[in-house]
Image (cartoon, rainbow, N blue to C red):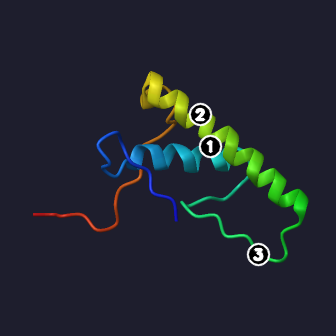
Amino acid sequence: SLVFTDNENNLDLGLKTLMIQEMIKRGILFNGSLVPCYSHTYTDIEYIEKAFGESLEVLIESKLKGLGGYLKGPSIKGVFRKTI
């Protein structure tokens, strides 16, 4: 599973949300992990690799210009949150 962090090494759910958004935009259902299996063909793997690279380019741009211009909806939230 991939972990997305900010410059201080804190979990950055905004970046993870953007990565999920960009992978889905390219037709890849992504939740933070890439799990290949024997049914994937070389063509499938090349497609996933291309989508992953393009998505990472968007993440790099967002780090330079700000996340707000790239994220199309609200950021995901952690499952285990302190409520008190």
* Residue type, numbered disc 1: Glu
**Whole-percent x, y for residue 17 in the image:** 48, 48
**Whole-percent x, y for residue 10 in the image:** 30, 49
Neighbours of disc 2 within 10 Å: few (<14), some (14-19), many (20+)? some
Task: Give how far apart the Cα atoms at labels 2 and 1 are.
Answer: 8 Å
Q: Which residue carries the number 3 mark?
A: 37
Tell me whether the residue at label 2 lies in contact with that at label 1, contact meaning CB atoms closer than 8 angstroms.
Answer: yes
**Left-right relation of 43 to 20:** right
**Left-right relation of 49 to 24:** right
Quarter residue 25 falls in = top right
Q: Looking at the image, which is closer to me, 31 or 41?
A: 41
* Residue type, numbered disc 2: Val
Residue at (28, 68) in percent of width and height: 80
Residue at (65, 48) in percent of width and height: 23
* Residue type, numbered disc 3: Cys
Residue at (44, 31) in percent of width and height: 67
Of badges 1 and 3, nearer the viewer stands 3
The tag earlier along the polypeptide, 1 or 3, is: 1
Task: Give how far apart the Cα atoms at labels 1 and 3 are.
Answer: 22 Å
Quadrant of image for the C terminus: bottom left
Residue 75 disc label: none
Residue at (73, 70) in percent of width and height: 36
The tag earlier along the polypeptide, 2 or 3, is: 3
Of badges 2 and 1, nearer the viewer stands 2
Farthest top residue in view: 65
The tag earlier along the polypeptide, 2 or 1, is: 1
Residue 58 disc label: 2
**Whole-percent x, y for residue 64 in the image:** 46, 24
Q: Which residue carries the number 1 mark?
A: 22
